[in-house]
């Protein structure tokens, strides 16, 4: 509250009232700690705590924050979230408006460059992306080396990391904005090709090369599903994917984005940094959740089994996958848009029977005190998997479908990191709780 009233100078602590007083009861000393005032919250610089000591040789205070529940790791201008109000904006534009009026490549430019593109800028960007969709033929050889049943996300992560070996000399030059932009174009362009090829490998189907006469999402759909010459990508499905891509572009400092920043802070090249971010995304608590939602819905199998499943969740024997979020304590705005899009997709694909289970689960959970009191609402992953499945994707592709658009967000955050003079190599502290020094015990005398 204090900080809100003191919102005088954004970014600095110049006004006298933008300080907090901290008294150390151990020493009786008081410290005036300046606030760094953001537009949404205020912070203290953790290094300010180091002056708080009990003696000259004391290290000084550090912040203890496992899982970064209350630590701002950066100042950012890319994505704004108000978790209590369910607000998500990219560069100031509400996600609802972008999903309705924009398209993926326009949003990608917005996120990467900060402003909506002019007509010429969008044409040039689209042209640049379109002409980088092909991958080196050796990529086929890697993919062929994976077992027929390899998980698509495992293949994707490894293949993106392997791209570093093709562009290493150039890509390691992370100091140059022009070189960085070139790698960004390459990655945005090649992700759908790699993703489609991982899918085709999984299915034992021949790889389809990019068709650069098609727009981004249609080209992806074509590489996924084309069999024979007369395949025509469905405009409804391509548009639905485009909307899903827009919704997944960025989500500020989540687990995978923080990974991108941490790895990028060591000045690793963007390919391996991105592969690390993808690995973080793969976890079932993050972007792997949509796959887990589908598996959960299948396991429940019938609406009549929902009450029993809810009881298992309350007994902590299972998680209600696709529910809950570290930041959103209300309905995830992306989940609302996805739910709406699902009905448009079902007009083409037919209704996914799992939808009825999902709707009933949501209805019960939103009334049940266990979920209400913990502010657990559907998140982006709750309905996305149902759409993906109706479109014909196997569950293994779900995290891959998340990673394609999130590549844009990861790269924008990486770019922001490298332009930020306050950033250094990421290196947290620890609180030592282990043994004091002790002498080595020879094997024969160990207990
Ligand atoms: N089902 C049942 N209980 C839950 C769930 C859930 N999905 N999520 C949180 N809780 C409970 C949790 O047990 C805890 O209860 P208590 O206070 O009694 O111990 C309380 O709610 C607070 O949860 P938390 O674990 O402290 O919350 P967190 O911020 O650390 O975790 C989360 C956030 C997303 C990891 C978690 O809600 C979760 O595991 N959800 C299921 C997985 C999922 O859907 N992930 C996708 C997230 S959105 C997309 C993305 O990030 O990629």
Image (spheres, helix red, strand yellow):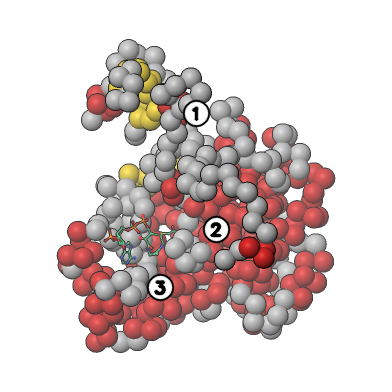
* Label 3: few (<14), some (14–19) or many (≥20) C-alpha neighbours in 10 Å: many
Query: Which one is closest to the eye, mark 1 or mark 3?
Result: 1
Could you tell whether 415 is left or right of 179 in the image? left
Mark 2 lies on residue: 280
Measured from the top left, where is residue 63 in percent x and y?
42, 36
What residue would you read off at disc 1?
A: 59
Name the front one of labels 1 and 2: 1
Label 3 C-beta lies within 8 Å of the nearest ligand 1 atom: yes
**Earlier residue among tags 1 and 2:** 1
Examine the image and state in which quarter residue 122 appears.
top right
Q: CA distance from mark 1 to mark 3?
A: 46 Å
Task: For the residues labelled 1 and 2, say whether their Cβ atoms are less than 8 Å apart.
Answer: no
Which of pointers 3 and 2 lies earlier in the amino acid sequence?
Answer: 2
Residue 65 located left or right of residue 145: left
* Element assignment for label 2: helix
Check the image and report above or below for 417 versus 367. Answer: above
Label 3 secondary element: helix
What is the spatial separation of the Cα atoms under label 3 and label 2, in whole angstroms? 18 Å
Residue 17, quarter of picture: top left
Q: Position of residue 246 (x, y in %)?
A: 48, 55
The one nearer the camera, 34 or 306, is 34
Relative height, residue 213 to residue 302 (above, below):
above
Identity of the residue furthest to the front in this view? 445
**Which residue is the site of mark 3?**
293
Evaluate whether residue 15 shows in this view: yes
User: Which residue corresponds to the image point at 34% horizontal and 83% vertical from the top-left?
Assistant: 300
């Amino acid at each position: 509250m204090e900080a809100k009233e003191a919102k005088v100078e954004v970014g600095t602590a110049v006004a006298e009232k933008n300080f907090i007083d901290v008294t150390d009861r151990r020493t009786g000393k008081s410290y005036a700690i300046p606030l760094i005032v953001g537009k949404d919250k205020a912070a203290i610089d953790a290094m300010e705590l180091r002056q708080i000591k009990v003696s000259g040789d004391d290290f000084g205070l550090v912040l203890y924050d496992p899982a970064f529940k209350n630590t701002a790791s950066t100042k950012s201008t890319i994505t704004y979230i108000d978790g209590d109000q369910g607000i998500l904006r990219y560069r100031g534009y509400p996600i609802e408006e972008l999903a309705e009026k924009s398209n993926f490549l326009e949003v990608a430019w917005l996120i990467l460059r900060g402003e909506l593109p002019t007509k010429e800028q969008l044409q040039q960007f689209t042209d640049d992306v379109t002409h980088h969709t092909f991958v080196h033929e050796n990529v086929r050889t890697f993919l062929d080396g994976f077992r027929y049943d390899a998980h698509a996300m495992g293949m994707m992560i490894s293949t993106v990391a392997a791209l570093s070996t093709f562009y290493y000399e150039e890509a390691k030059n992370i100091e140059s904005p022009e070189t960085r932009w070139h790698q960004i174009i390459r990655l945005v362009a090649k992700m759908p090709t790699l993703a489609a090829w991982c899918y085709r490998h999984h299915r034992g189907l021949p790889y389809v090369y990019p068709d650069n006469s098609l727009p981004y999402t249609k080209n992806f759909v074509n590489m996924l599903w084309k069999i024979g010459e007369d395949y025509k990508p469905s405009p409804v499905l391509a548009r639905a994917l485009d909307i899903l891509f827009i919704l997944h572009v960025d989500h500020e400092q989540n687990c995978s984005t923080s990974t991108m920043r941490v790895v990028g802070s060591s000045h690793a090249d963007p390919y391996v940094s991105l592969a690390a971010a993808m690995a973080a995304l793969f976890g079932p608590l993050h972007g792997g959740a949509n796959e887990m939602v589908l598996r959960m819905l299948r396991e429940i199998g019938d609406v009549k089994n929902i009450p029993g499943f809810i009881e298992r969740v309350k007994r902590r024997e299972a998680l209600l996958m696709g529910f809950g979020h570290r930041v959103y304590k209300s309905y995830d705005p992306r989940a609302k848009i996805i739910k709406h899009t699902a009905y448009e997709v079902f007009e083409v694909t037919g209704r996914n029977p799992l939808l009825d289970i999902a709707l009933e689960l949501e209805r019960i959970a939103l009334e049940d005190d266990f979920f209400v009191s913990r502010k657990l609402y559907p998140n982006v992953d709750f309905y996305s998997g149902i759409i993906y499945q109706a479109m014909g994707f196997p569950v293994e592709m779900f995290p891959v479908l998340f990673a394609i658009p999130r590549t844009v967000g990861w790269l924008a955050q990486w770019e922001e990191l490298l332009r930020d003079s306050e950033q250094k190599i990421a290196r947290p502290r620890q609180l030592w709780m282990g043994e004091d020094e002790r002498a080595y015990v020879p094997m024969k005398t160990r207990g």
